[in-house]
Amino acid sequence: MTEILRTEGLGKRFSGLIANQNIDFSVDAGTVRCVIGPNGAGKTTFISMISGHHSASEGKIFYKGRDITHQSVIKRANVGIARKFQTPAVFEELTAYQNIELAVLGSQCLQADRHDRINEVLQLVRLTDQSAMQAQILSHGQRQWLEIGLLIAIEAELLLLDEPTAGMTVEESAATALLINMLVREHNLTAIIIEHDIQFIKDLKAPVTVLHLGQVLCEGSFDDVAANKEVREVYLGTDEGRSL
Amino acid sequence: MNMAATTSKPWAGLSNKIASETGVAGIVFMILALIPIFVPGYTTYILPQYMLFGLLAVSLAFLWGFVGILSFGQAAFFAIGAYAMGITMKTSMGINPAYVGLLVSFIIGGGIAAIVGYFLFSAGVRSTYFVLVTLALSIMTEQIAVSQSDITGGWNGMYMDRITLTFFDLGKMVLSDDMSSYYAIFILVIISYLALRYLLSVKFGKVLVGIRENEERMTALGYNVSLYKTSAFALSGAFASFAGALYGSHANFVSPSLGGILFSTEVVVWVAIGGRHSLLGALVGGIIVASISNYLSAWTPEYWQLLLGLIFITVIVFFKGGVAGAVKSLYGLWLERHKR
Amino acid sequence: MEVAASVFVDATLITLVLALAAFGLAIIYGLIGVINMGHGALLTLGAYLTWAATSSGMPFLIAVVMASVGVGFVGLLLEHFLVRHFYDRPFDSLLLTWAFFLIMTEIIKIVFGTDFRNVANPLPGAIDFGAFSVPAYRGAVSLFSLALIGASAYVYFRTSLGIKIRALIQNREMASLLGLNISLTNKLVFVTGATIAGLAGSLLCPMLSIDPYIGNVYLVRSFFVVIVGGLGQLLGGTLIGSFVIGGAETLFSLAFKQTFAQTVVFLLAILILRFRPAGLLGTK
């Protein structure tokens, strides 16, 4: 098991407001890690620092052993880090096919193979029938899948997924968990997932990191974390806490 | 709406559109090819200049319609190309100065656009500021043309000759008569149009459209967006300059106002009306609106400009895709109707 | 020493005059984000209305007021029928206000003809300060510009209206949630900006020969004043921006020809724009 991502003492400050502080985090290649925490815990900011959209105020980030703390978003995307945003960032007026095509164009796929590759990805994210439909008329869940499809098509190795099941039905969430586990298992991808959907997290059967007030509160398997006294206190009174 | 399921070519709908645009383009070019035979005289003399305005419009549509970058400075490149051509043709050199002039214009226009583009895009300057910079570019070009009068002739303008075609050692031909000038320019305009069309159909063009649609997403996918934008701007500047070089030589004259903001913004009006998402729409729009403008301006300048302004507003508010867009929609509706 | 004093005075006068011309644009662009490409046309209209009024015998100051109100009214029409629908689409409002410029310029040509017009200088002569002299009218306009900005500063910093305006700049959405009537505010801001543009054109016209395009000279410069000063920095930004643009022009025109000096100033402004996109006074 080789470590693919590590942060040391990572922190982010926004003129006075401390969003993240002192985060030591590590995830191995070919695994899934869920990042959970109440609203305002700094989860999205943390992901933003890994993708490069926010610069770190302090600390370092290592990807495959190399210090990427000051690398641009573009560079990080080119070495395999790809992000799915909280509100789906797809090409609304282009068709599902055209969306995936743009990602495939940015990958190492040869021109002759592009068409097949695009259809392959569409099939993986269950959008084959929607191939000629504009992204904006897809359902919210389908748009999430489309965005995940972009990340697959770009041949990302580390997927940063920010609330991938938001707006999905129970059935869609279950399918998404299956998809992610399959990608991780068969293509050796790594996924760091911010989530609120407890059932989805359980389906993933993956270790969990809990963030609270910008710092790591606790880490472990889902059951361990759910049983943790501090975690339960922090979540006390929230819907998620009730289902823990 | 029942979309064809696993179509092996989901671009089918799009390729129909392309096929029909190619079809219309073919018709347009055939008409243009036949005009000198059927309407000789003044029309044959003046139409090449309008075709070059059309090419200028195409250079803007490429940038505005497909990358989403509005430029109020295309005329600056047009004038730069014309002046570069004039200056080069006055210089004696081993090779045909006209050929060198065309190449120089293309390179200078593209080069200036590349420098300005890279300078601004790499810093993430917002696109609204970019519009203002292009506006300033036009003003600066006009001012430089006026103030550096030793080189440019200032307000008096610069005269230049028609292009002399030389065919290695086989002989030479001065394009001094209308017919030969017409066809020479006609061919070069078509080649330019096809070149830009081609670029739009391959990866480069698709990436540009992606940038237009969602720049942030393209960045997050690892595309060097500012490099693509710079390249697009450089191409549009290069072709605008190329058109300007041909224009200067055909009209035998260039003056500072050719690069100024009034003309620059006129190009925007042509493209808005013709259709910014269609190179052919821009080409035809440029030719037609420019020629109508010139014709009516001699007659009733203010009322025509007033009407043009109103048409412009109508297009911006109701017909974003211009005439070409409206035609495509109607064609799409017609196809739907006749499918059943 | 004398030369320095005279250059400084020139720069100050030019700064204040430019600030007056740019202020209307700064208000509209800074407060409601509309790139008013018709700004120059509003200035021109102000000049022509002033000419029309003074030609028919009206005293200069009355003419100025009438012209400003007239232009403000045109601004209201423009806002109500066009701009109002495109506040969230900056490029569309840019193009529409440009279309307004095209149309207004033609209307001016049709109504007033294209010959140069002149409005007599109401304060001819110059005031001699020994080391330098100040043209009387230009000095008066500069003082007025300063007073206008000063009065605006008072409103901005010390009145409840000012607080609302500052709230609007900070966060439009929040401001509307807090009860600010956004559409009415947009109208007020646009009309105010237009009126000030008309006022500027009106006050400036005795110093120029009037033709249908005089306002355009100020269009791009005004934009650069706003960008260099900082979008949203209505007062300090306009002054600093005007000082940089106006001052640089004065300086460079000592070294280069007038037309070329402006080119150099634009290049300077583009440099500043690139390295300090938020302007000299802007934050972020």
Image (tube, grey):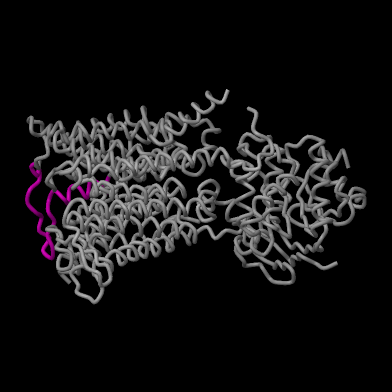
- Position of C216 with respect to C134 (left or right) is right
Q: Is C7 located above or below residue B95 in the figure? A: above
Residue A229: x %, y % from top left: 90, 49
Image quadrant where one finds the N terminus of chain C: bottom left
The residue that appears at 55% across and 47% down in the rendered structure is B214
Instruction: Give the image quarter of residue C76.
Output: top left
Q: Residue furthest bottom?
A: B94
Q: Nearer the viewer, residue B290 or C94?
A: B290
Residue B90: x %, y % from top left: 18, 69
The residue that appears at 56% across and 40% down in the rendered structure is A93
The residue that appears at 21% across and 66% down in the rendered structure is B172
Q: Residue furthest front?
A: B170
Residue C187: x %, y % from top left: 38, 31
Q: Nearer the viewer, residue B288 or C10?
A: B288
Was residue C129 drawn as part of the magenta stretch in this picture?
yes
The answer to whether residue C236 is visible is no
Was residue C14 drawn as part of the magenta stretch in this picture?
no
Instruction: Give the image quarter of residue C77.
Output: top left
Q: Is B325 located above or below residue A189 in the figure? A: above
Q: Which residues are magenta?
A: C120-147
Residue A108: x %, y % from top left: 65, 61
Q: Is A140 located above or below residue B110 in the figure? A: above
Q: Nearer the viewer, residue C27 or B294?
A: B294
The answer to whether residue A93 is visible is yes
